[in-house]
Image: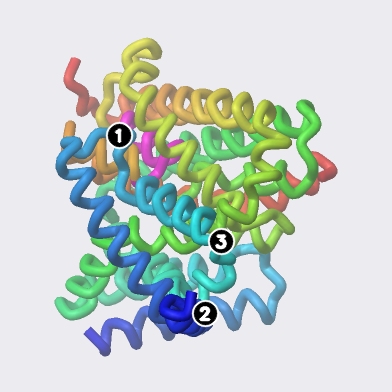
Amino acid sequence: MHSILPLFHVWAYLQTQPLLGLTATLCVWEVACFIDARAGHAALSNPTVLSIIILAALLLITHTSYQAYFTGAVYIHFLLGPATVALAVPMYANWPAIRRHFLAIIVSLTAGSVIAAGSAMLIAHALGAPRAVVISLGPKSVTTPIAMGISQNLGGQPSLTAVFVMITAMFGTLVCGLVFRLARVRDWRARGLAAGMAAHGLATSRMLMLNQTAGAFGGLAIGLNGIVTSIALPILVSVMGL
Amino acid sequence: MIRALVVLLLCQLAGTVIQQGSGLPIPGPVIGLVMLLAYLIKAGGPAPYLKDTAQGLLKYFGLLFVPAGVGVVTELQELRENAFAIAVAIPVSTLLGLLVTGVLMNWLAGREGAESDA
């Protein structure tokens, strides 16, 4: 007992410092990327999802509070803001395509976005989920940083939204190919736009592997859906009387 | 790289000031995104330093979600209690969204000029 006492001191000290949380996040990310590469980048081995599962398990096993972990992880978390602004750069690259099909894009994207968010909230509400869960479900098709911002502004729980976004992304990526075949959506622009709208980054990176145009329209849909949902969801929430 | 960060942070700052000042429900960084996009369209494209940093940052987009996602440990009970509602709401709404946007865009863009593999 005498000999391990100093270790407790070190551990207690580290829990109050940013070093451990930051280092753990980056280490786990590297491990997750390694696993993902070994798994051939399959839809279910997404490095973000893997990292979250591993880190969450580590916190639970070591009885570390999320707050203690976040003291260090906040430095990574902060970069979400500038990264969201940076989405303007790939959106600009798709600007000629946006201009050519402006009306078609806005109409299809807004319709799908409102129906996806509205039906998610209606179903959860009907099945008895509390308001915070219902609101947190609303922005689930939006890319994570924007979704969390929307959720927070409307009184949802950003971390719950982050989980819903991940589940949506994995589900959407798994089924989108089948849905497009069954519904006879053959146009690659339509496939990319729908995949990016419903399941953002994960589905878009999958589209990018299949077709360049689909990838470009997916990237476009991620940014546009963030803007459309930011505007539409507050209206939808008040119309639904939540 | 620092100059690019200055541009990105200033856009985010301006967006956040607008959001807080006006009480708009749109997140500050999204307003910053729109402002930067408007600037890029007007300027005719990003300077190389901005393009490089933006691409570098977005390459690690997946990593940036991790700290927030780990927050799931504080929501486990909420998730368990509402597991059924969530397990129905997410798949159904995602399928509906995929269908509506896919079918509409297929029809509308198809009329403007085909680009399909059929």
How many angstroms separate mark 3 from mark 1 (CA)?
Answer: 31 Å
Q: Chain of mark 3?
A: A
Tell me which label, 3 or 2, sits earlier in the chain. Answer: 2
The residue drawn where x is 39% and y is 18% is: A179
The residue drawn where x is 36% and y is 32% is: A173
> Residue A67 in magenta?
no
At numbered mark 3, what does the secondary structure look like: helix, strand or loop?
Answer: loop
> Are the residues flagged by discs 3 and 2 in contact, CB closer than 8 Å?
no
Quarter of the rendering occupied by the C terminus of chain A: top right
> Residue A192 in magenta?
yes
Kind of residue indicated by mark 1:
Ala
In the rendered image, which residue does mark 2 sit on? A12
Q: Looking at the picture, does residue A109 appear above or below residue B108? A: below
Kind of residue indicated by mark 2:
Ala
Q: Which residues are magenta?
A: A190-201
Q: Which mark is residue A65?
A: none
In the rendered image, which residue does mark 3 sit on? A63
* A107 left or right of A240 in image: left
Which-is-in-front pick, marks 1 and 2? 2
Percent coordinates x, y for residue A68 in the rendering: 55, 73
Colour option used: rainbow
In the rendered image, which residue does mark 1 sit on? A43
Our reading of the magenta stretch's main secondary structure is helix
The one nearer the camera, A151 or B104, is A151
Q: Are marks 3 and 2 on the same chain?
A: yes
At numbered mark 1, what does the secondary structure look like: helix, strand or loop?
Answer: helix
Percent coordinates x, y for residue B80 in the rendering: 67, 37
Which image quarter: residue B110?
top left
The residue drawn where x is 76% and y is 36% is: A129
